[in-house]
């Protein structure tokens, strides 16, 4: 393993793709085995709210990365800055939280109970295969500074 590879999180999954595949599987199962049918008037508001909340969370997150000059979604490069402000004051993973909210918003929008159920294993996959590797990487890159941050801020919420 090269020195460059040792300094990266070595994540093999593409998180937005994991969410998208799971969502499409849930929507597909819903077409075959529909569990519930929620009227449009009952689901439109919550769906739009979840999707909007996702956007409100992801925008400042991306801006923080750009401002800090550290890679946002390129797992082949090491983190150069530990970001602890903005949404990172409340969650160590606001990006995955935003993707989860977006996923749920689309699931509700399409009245897909299956998609909403599949969000649980999706989040578990992201937590085990992505978040924990990112945390190991950040701990090796930033040491005590990251450990202090980790004890002060929750992983998801």
Image (cartoon, grey):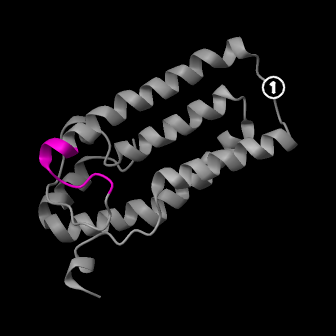
Spot occupied by residue 33 in the image (x, y as percentages of width and height)? 86, 42
Left or right: 59, with 78 as reference point: right
Nearest the camera: 82 or 32? 32
Outermost residue, bottom side: 1
Spot occupied by residue 47 in the image (x, y as percentages of width and height)? 58, 24
- Quadrant of residue 113 within the rendered picture: top right
Q: Kindly identify the residue that appears in the image at 20 percent across and 71 percent down.
A: 140
Q: Is residue 23 above or below residue 107?
A: below
Q: Is residue 135 above or below residue 60?
A: below
Residues shaded magenta: 65-73
Q: Kindly identify the residue that appears in the image at 40 percent across and 30 percent down.
A: 55
Identify the element where label 1 is drawn. Answer: loop
Residue 53 lies within the magenta run: no
Residue 68 lies within the magenta run: yes
Mark 1 Cα shell of 10 Å, populated few (<14), some (14-19), many (≥20): few
Left or right: 71, with 156 as reference point: left
Task: State the residue position of label 1.
Answer: 37
So how many labels did they put on this image? 1
Spot occupied by residue 83 in the image (x, y as percentages of width and height)? 18, 48
Nearest the camera: 143 or 14? 14
- Quadrant of residue 58 within the rendered picture: top left
Spot occupied by residue 117 in the image (x, y as percentages of width and height)? 68, 44
Q: Quadrant of the N terminus?
A: bottom left
Q: Kindly identify the residue that appears in the image at 32 percent across and 43 percent down.
A: 91
Left or right: 136, with 120 as reference point: left
Q: Is residue 20 above or below residue 2?
A: above
Nearest the camera: 17 or 100? 17
Q: Kindly identify the residue that appears in the image at 62 percent across and 52 percent down.
A: 21
- Asked if residue 87 shows in the view, the reply is no
Nearest the camera: 57 or 152? 57
Q: Quadrant of the C terminus?
A: top left
């Amino acid at each position: 393993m090269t020195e460059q590879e040792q300094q990266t999180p070595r994540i093999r999954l593409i998180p937005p793709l994991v969410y998208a595949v799971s969502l499409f599987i849930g929507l597909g199962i819903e077409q075959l085995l529909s569990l519930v049918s929620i009227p449009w008037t009952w689901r439109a508001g919550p769906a739009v709210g979840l999707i909007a909340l996702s956007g409100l969370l992801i925008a400042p997150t991306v801006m923080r990365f750009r401002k800090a000059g550290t890679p946002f979604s390129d797992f082949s490069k090491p983190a150069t800055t530990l970001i602890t402000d903005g949404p990172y004051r409340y969650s160590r993973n606001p990006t995955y939280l935003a993707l989860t909210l977006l996923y749920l918003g689309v699931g509700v929008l399409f009245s897909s109970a299956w998609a909403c159920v599949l969000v649980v294993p999706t989040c578990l996959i992201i937590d085990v295969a992505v978040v924990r590797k990112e945390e190991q990487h950040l701990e090796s890159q930033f040491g005590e500074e990251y450990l202090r941050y980790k004890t002060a801020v929750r992983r998801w919420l």
